[in-house]
Image (cartoon, rainbow, N blue to C red):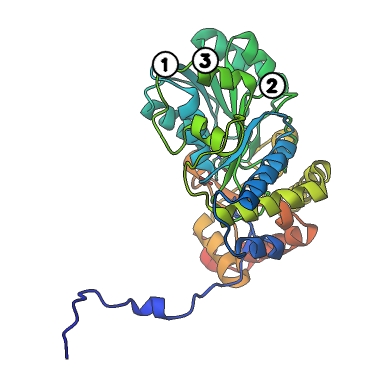
C-alpha cells in the first residue's frame, strides 16, 4: 500500500451536505432573495465576453439608469460589494493632494474618509452627531471653508437610520466647483433619488438591500462633470481592477470595441439583472411607497411598545432601516439572539457610532411588507416581556 502524500485529510465537515436554515433577514442587509432571483443565479454560465452576456450587461446598465434616474453613459455594475463601489468612486475621482470634504454622521462617512486618506487625498471632515442630517447651510459652510473638489455624503446612513435630504445639494456643490459623490447603498429603491435632476456626479449602491440580490455586485454611475475630472487626471488610478477607464470599455460605455478586463462574476450579474427587472416591473414610485408605508407601520408599532426611535424627525428617517434605542435595562445582544433563536428573525445591533445604543430593523424590497412588520413587532414584544434573561 502506498502511503498518502497528503498531510491534510479531506475536511469531514465538507463531506456533509450544505446546511442552510430558514431565516427572515430583517437586519440592515443582506435581505431575503426571492426565488426568481435565486433561480437566475443558479443558471448555467455564459462566457464573460459572449454576446449574450454583453447583452445582459447592457440590460443591467439600463436597469441602473432607471433606478438612479440618470441618462449617464458611464453607468455599470462593479464586480464587488458596496465597499468596492465606494473605493471605485473615490479612487477614480481623487488624486494625491486633492481635497475631499467628507460628511460624517455615522460609519459610512468614517469609512469614506479612511479610504480617501489611504489614497493620499487631503481629507476634511464635516461632522454631525449620529442621528442628525446635514442642512444646506452646514454643507455650504464646509464648502466655503475647505474648497474641496469632491464632497462625499451618505443618502441612507444605515448605521444610524438617517435619510439625508439631497435637494439643492448638487447645485450648491457645483456653485463651489465641487463634485457631489453620494452613497445610496442602503436607500436605493427605498427612498426617492434623482441622479440627474439632483445633479449628483457619482452615485453608487449595492445589490443586497432593496434589490434583494445576493451580495457581490454594485451599481455605479458617473456624470459628465465627473468624467471630465477623471479625464484630467495626471496619474493613473491606484487600482487596475477598479480603473473606470477599463471598466467603461468593458461595459461598452466608451464607444470602442470591448476588451477583456476581468472575468465578470456572470451569475452575480444574472441575479442583479433580475433584481433590477423586478424593480422596473414594480416601478420606483410603488417601491418608494411600499417602503414608506412599512416603515411608518413599524415606527408606530415600536412607539406603541413604549420604545424610543433614534431619529427624532420623521422626515429624516430612512424608510429601509429603522433604528430604535435599546430600552433601559436590556442588553441588545440578548434581544437579537432571542429573535434569532425563537423566531429565526435577524435584526441587528448598532454599528460604529451607534454600537450598543440601538437596534436596527431592516425592511427592504420583498421584505418590506405589513406581515413582516407584524412578525417582527410580535417577536420583539415577546423578547421584552417574557425573557427575564434580557433584563440586566
Ligand atoms: N454604504 C452603506 C450605506 C451601507 O449600508 C453599506 C452596507 N451595510 C455599505 C456602504 C457597504 O456595503 P457592503 O457591505 O456591500 O460592502
Q: Earlier in the sequence, mark 3 or mark 2?
A: 3
- How packed mark 1 is, by other alpha carbons closer than 10 Å (few <14, some 14-19, many 20 or more), is few
Residue at the spot x=72%, y=40% of the render?
62
Q: Earlier in the sequence, mark 3 or mark 1?
A: 3
Q: Is residue 18 left or right of residue 360?
A: left
Tell me the quadrant of the picture where the N terminus can be found.
bottom left
The answer to which of 306 and 274 lies nearer the viewer is 274
Assign a secondary structure to mark 1.
loop
Residue bearing mark 1: 234
Q: Is residue 308 visible?
A: no
Task: Kindly identify which numbered label has been placed on residue 199.
Answer: 2
Assign a secondary structure to mark 3.
loop
Q: Does residue 234 sit above or below 353 in this rendering?
A: above
Q: CA distance from mark 3 to mark 2?
A: 15 Å
The answer to which of 261 and 153 lies nearer the viewer is 261
Q: x, y percentage for residue 148?
A: 51, 14
Q: Check contact, mark 2 vs mark 1: CB within 8 A.
A: no
Task: Kindly identify which numbered label has been placed on residue 149.
Answer: 3
Q: Earlier in the sequence, mark 2 or mark 1?
A: 2
Report the image quarter containing ligand 1.
top right
Q: Is residue 247 visible?
A: yes
Q: x, y percentage for residue 135?
A: 65, 21
Q: Does residue 86 sit above or below 225 in this rendering?
A: below
Residue at the spot x=66%, y=30% of the render?
73
Amino acid at each position: 500500500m502506498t502511503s498518502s502524500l497528503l498531510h491534510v485529510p479531506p475536511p469531514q465537515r465538507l463531506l456533509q451536505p450544505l446546511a442552510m436554515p430558514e431565516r427572515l433577514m430583517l437586519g440592515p442587509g443582506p435581505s431575503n432573495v426571492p426565488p426568481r432571483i435565486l433561480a437566475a443565479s443558479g443558471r448555467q454560465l455564459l462566457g464573460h465576453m459572449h454576446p449574450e452576456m454583453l447583452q445582459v450587461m447592457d440590460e443591467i446598465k439600463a436597469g441602473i439608469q432607471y433606478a438612479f434616474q440618470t441618462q449617464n453613459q458611464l453607468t455599470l455594475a462593479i464586480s464587488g460589494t458596496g465597499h468596492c463601489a465606494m473605493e471605485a468612486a473615490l479612487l477614480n475621482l481623487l488624486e494625491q493632494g486633492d481635497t475631499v470634504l467628507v460628511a460624517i454622521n455615522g460609519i459610512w462617512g468614517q469609512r469614506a474618509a479612511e479610504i480617501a486618506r489611504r489614497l493620499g487625498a487631503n481629507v476634511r471632515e464635516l461632522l454631525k452627531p449620529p442621528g442628525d442630517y446635514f442642512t444646506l447651510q452646514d454643507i455650504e459652510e464646509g464648502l466655503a471653508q475647505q474648497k474641496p473638489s469632491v464632497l462625499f455624503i451618505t443618502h441612507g446612513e444605515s448605521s444610524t437610520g438617517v435619510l439625508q435630504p439631497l435637494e439643492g445639494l448638487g447645485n450648491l456643490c457645483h456653485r463651489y466647483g465641487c463634485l457631489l459623490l453620494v452613497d445610496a447603498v442602503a436607500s436605493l429603491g427605498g427612498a426617492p433619488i434623482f441622479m440627474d435632476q439632483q445633479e449628483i456626479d457619482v452615485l453608487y449602491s449595492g445589490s443586497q438591500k432593496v434589490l434583494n440580490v445576493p451580495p457581490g455586485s454594485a451599481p455605479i454611475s458617473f456624470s459628465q462633470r465627473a468624467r471630465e475630472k477623471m479625464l484630467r487626471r495626471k496619474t493613473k488610478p491606484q487600482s487596475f481592477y477598479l480603473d473606470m477607464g477599463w471598466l467603461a470599455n468593458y461595459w461598452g460605455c466608451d464607444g470602442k470595441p470591448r476588451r477583456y478586463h476581468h472575468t465578470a462574476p456572470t451569475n452575480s450579474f444574472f441575479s442583479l439583472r433580475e433584481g433590477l427587472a423586478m424593480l422596473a416591473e414594480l416601478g420606483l414610485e410603488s417601491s418608494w411607497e411600499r417602503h414608506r408605508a412599512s416603515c411608518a407601520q413599524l415606527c408606530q408599532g415600536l412607539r406603541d411598545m413604549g420604545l424610543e426611535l433614534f431619529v427624532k424627525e420623521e422626515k429624516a428617517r430612512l424608510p429601509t432601516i429603522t433604528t430604535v434605542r435599546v430600552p433601559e435595562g436590556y442588553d441588545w445582544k440578548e434581544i437579537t439572539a432571542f429573535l434569532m433563536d425563537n423566531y429565526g428573525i435577524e435584526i441587528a445591533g448598532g454599528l460604529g457610532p451607534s454600537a450598543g445604543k440601538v437596534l436596527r430593523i431592516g425592511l427592504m424590497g420583498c421584505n418590506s411588507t405589513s406581515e413582516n412588520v407584524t412578525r417582527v413587532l410580535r417577536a420583539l414584544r415577546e423578547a421584552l416581556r417574557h425573557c427575564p434573561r434580557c433584563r440586566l
